[in-house]
Structure formats: C-alpha cells, structure tokens
Image (tube, rainbow, N blue to C red):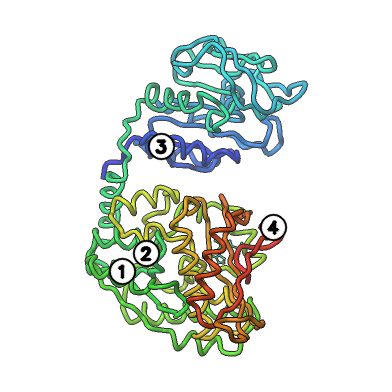
Amino acid sequence: MDRQDTILIIDFGGQYCHLISRRIRDFGVATEIVPADISFQELAEKKYIRGIILSGGAMSVFDKNAPTLDPRILLLSVHFLGICYGHQLLAHLQRGRVQQGKSGEYGLTPLRVINRNGLLKRLNKTESVWMNHRDVVTKLPSSFLVLAATKHSHIAAYASKDKKFFGVQFHPEVTHTQKGDQILKNFVLDIARCKPTRSSLSLVDSIVAEASDSIGNRKTIIALSGGVDSSVAATLVSRAIGRRLTAIYVDTGLMRHKETEEIKKTFQKIPLRLKVVDAKKQFFSALKGVTEPEKKRKIIGKLFIDIFTKEAKQEKADVLVQGTIYSDRIESGITKHSSVIKSHHNVGGLPKNLGLELYEPLRDLYKDEVRALARTLALPPPILTRQVFPGPGLAIRIIGEVTPERTDIVRQASRIIEEELRKTKHWDAIWMSFAVLLPIKSVGIQGDERSYKYPVVVRIVESRDAMTAQFLKLPFEILEQISTRITNEVREVNRVVYDITHKPPATMEWE
Ligand code: XMP
C-alpha cells in the first residue's frame, strides 16, 4: 500500500510534541512521531517522509545526556524544521553557535520578521510568538540566513540558503503564537510539498487495506465494550475481513441504560459475528457481600478476563484486535497517576499471554480523529455521543454492596440525569454525568406518607484530560428538574444531593 506524504516528528521530550502532530493533521497531512534515538537505517526506510520536524525539549545541547541525532539523518533529501530545542540542535549540528542566554525568554514575545518569504510567508512585520527557552543560537553557518529576531534572540528564526533547513526558537504549535498555523502550513504544504490527503474517508480506506494485509485469512476476535474506540475498531476490521471477525461483548449487568440493546442493534447490522455473553449472574454473585472499592475492581477485572479468555479459546482465533489509540500508548500521566489511586480496568487491558497476535488499527489516532471516523462510518448517535464509561461499570457508582436492584437504581437515575442534560446547552461541555447510590437511608415525605429510602448523589464534571475536573456550576433550575424527576420516577429514592467537589481533592468516580 502506498503511504501518503508524511511529516515525521522527532520527539526530544518537548511537552508540545503531540500538539505539533495535531496541528499538522488538521491540515489533512499525515504525521508520525518517533523517538530521538531512531536509527538512520530505520528512518531512511520511511520513503514517504517529506519533512522532518525536530521538536522542543527540556534539555540544553550542552547537557551531558542531551538527546541528539545521527548526523547522517541530516543528509536525507527532505526538509527539516527545528522548533525550540530542535532549532538549537540543528544549528549546533551544522556548526553554528549556541550559547546559554543571560536570562530566559518565556511567554508571549514580539517578533520582528526580517524575511517574509518561505517559512514566514504571509506574516506581518511584527508578530506575537510564544517563547520558552534559555539557550540561544548566536551564530549561523555562512550558508544560513536570519529570518526573524526578538529582543533577546537575534536569531529567532533561520533558513539555509538551499531551503533545506529551517529553525524557529518560538513554538508555532501553541495557539498563543498568532500565526503559528500559518508557519506550520508554510513548512508542511509549501516547503515540504505534502499533499493533504488525510481525511476520514481516506483513513477508512487505508486502515481497512492495512487490516486486510495484516490479518489475511486468520480468525480474529475483538472485545467490544460499546465505547467509541472498540466500536470503530470492530467496524473497520469487519470491513476488511467480514465474518472472520468475532466481536465478543460481555454483558456484565453493570452497563448503562439500553447499552447492551444498542450494541446488539448496531453490530447485528455490521458484517461480523457478534457474540453477546450474558454474564450478569456471574458478576452479581462474585460481587455479593463485597463492599471494598479495590476488591470490587479486582473481582470485576479478573472475571472479565476469565470470561473473555474462555470465549477466545472457544473461537480458536489467531489475532486479537484492540481499540488502543495514540494517547493510550504514550506514557501519559493519566495512566501512571490513576493506577496508583485506583486499579484501572478496561478491555484494552487484556493479558498478553492469551497466545494471540495483537493488532491495533487505531494505534496512531487521537480521540477526536476516532470520533470523526465514527461519524464517517455512520455509527449510531448513542455510540457516537456516549460519555466515557469506566471498565468496572456501574459497580463503582454504588457505594457498598452491588446488587441487581441497586444497580438498577443508579442506572435509572443516571438515565434521567442524561436526558435532562441533553436538553441543555451544557451537554457538550460535560465530561461525565451520573448518579451515585449511597448505602444509607433517610426520612422523607412522599404522597403524604413517611418514606425511608436511599439518597442519590448527582455528579456532573467537566475535564480536559481526566487528570483534573471541575464540578459543573449548573443553574439550579436544571438541578431542580433532575431532582424532581429522580424522586418521582425512581421509587427507591427520596433525596437527591449534588456533588460540589473538584478533582482533586475528589476523584470523578466515587470509588
Ligand atoms: P477518576 O475517578 O480516577 O476517573 O477521577 C477519571 C476517568 O477515568 C475513568 N475511569 C476508568 N476508566 N477503567 C476505565 O476504563 C477504569 O477502571 C476506570 N476508573 C475510572 C472515569 O470514568 C473518568 O472518566
């Protein structure tokens, strides 16, 4: 399969590395991020690379263990753009001079544009750029030109006269840099001449073709969770290999309202073999009498794996498809941080010793790209617009023992919360909204009679990255409507409270 024109990003540990990639993909051009110690051979084999960007990084080129590049890479006939650390390293490797600045240059900085062609085409004479550095390039090789300067960095941007090497001391990938997108476009589209071919439609074609090549005639399974990632992965692989793909969906009894029905409805129409394993009894009996949150999580995780392993063996499959996406693969703070606090479980966490070859069709995609694919594949709205949902399901939203009855209370109350919020303009801003059941009872009055029933907590949070979250400051009228409907429609509840705690100090889920 011919690979489309691609910009390779060499990661020098810059916190902005993935932003560079996101920006460029927004122009319809493919990107690939590789570590700085990539070998010359490996890189030279990537014939589809049109340009190489050297990202920023926290080090100084003078540091003892400073990351560098195999100098032969600079001989490849592609265009190079260094950003921040990359800008300094490119100059350093070409025998320019880099020195430690007298002081750092941080934040929004006026840039005097000296040469408004090539890399800085369509920029004004003065622009505002985002700086974050201490070292500066103070001398360029004779074959290089200065393109722009700031008060602190006399060489804030440069180009080699043969237009092969470019560098910018500032960060074009952050939105604070006013014309950052224009600069990246100038490099990617005009200088490196990448053809923007990446669209959701072309992505579908290339993933399907790759899946077909990689899997061939082999029997394949996927654990379907109903989340957007595994749904998209299953749909794409089914386009490649049809009914040689078996999707296994374990109904734990801990799913959201109509989730299982929705999965059946959607995936029965897709040419794959859908196997719905009704494991409700097994899960509820394993959870009987268990109140400790970590114990619940461990029981659910293990049972899920046991059931899946048994089904996988029965299927006699050779390949396991997982919906792992790019962010799952980067060693992100979220995995490290969360695993300390809670034993995370999801279907992406299947054991390696299943004896199956792993295939991850979405491994290079970001979440919003997967969502765009889901729209292109016309997956139904309930799957498309579903909020993230934890692997252990509703069990960790029931404090104390998990029983079918209590699960149903949480499920119904959460459905009402969702129905009410979907009517408001707040829905799109919400990361998660749900009910939590407390294992206590309080006195109320319903229909002129004393009642003694459960309270539910309404939890509604917004978040950008799951690491931190804020409770939503919703108008009281909306909360009132939620409260009224829950106490009217869910028989076992007579009191509703709103959780007004951010994360930290709380977590989003209660367990
Ligand atoms: P917390 O409660 O840690 O949740 O603030 C952050 C995000 O992670 C989700 N979550 C999980 N997701 N398996 C998952 O796949 C899990 O075990 C799990 N526990 C929490 C939670 O729903 C929220 O979106």
> Looking at the picture, how far across and down is residue 225, in whole percent?
41, 68
The answer to whether the residue bearing label 2 lies less than 8 angstroms from the nearest atom of ligand 1 is: no
- Mark toward the viewer: 3 or 4: 4
- Mark toward the viewer: 4 or 1: 4
Marks 2 & 1, CB-CB < 8 Å contact: yes
Marks 1 & 3, CB-CB < 8 Å contact: no
Amino acid type, callout 2:
Val
Report the disc number at residue 26: 3
Q: Which residue is mark 1?
A: 220
Distance from the alpha carbon under mark 2 to that under mark 1? 7 Å
Residue shown at 45% from the left, 24% from the top: 182
As rendered, which of 51 and 132 lies closer to the eye?
132
Q: Secondary structure at mark 3?
A: helix
> Looking at the picture, how far across and down is residue 474, in whole percent?
58, 55
Marks 2 & 4, CB-CB < 8 Å contact: no
Which sits earlier in the primary sequence, circle 4 or circle 1? Answer: 1
165 above or below 315?
A: above
Distance from the alpha carbon under mark 2 to that under mark 3? 27 Å
Amino acid type, callout 1:
Thr
Distance from the alpha carbon under mark 4 to that under mark 1? 41 Å
Is the residue marked by circle 4 packed among few (<14), some (14-19), or many (20+) residues within 10 Å? few
Q: The N terminus is located in which quarter?
A: top left
Distance from the alpha carbon under mark 1 to that under mark 3? 33 Å
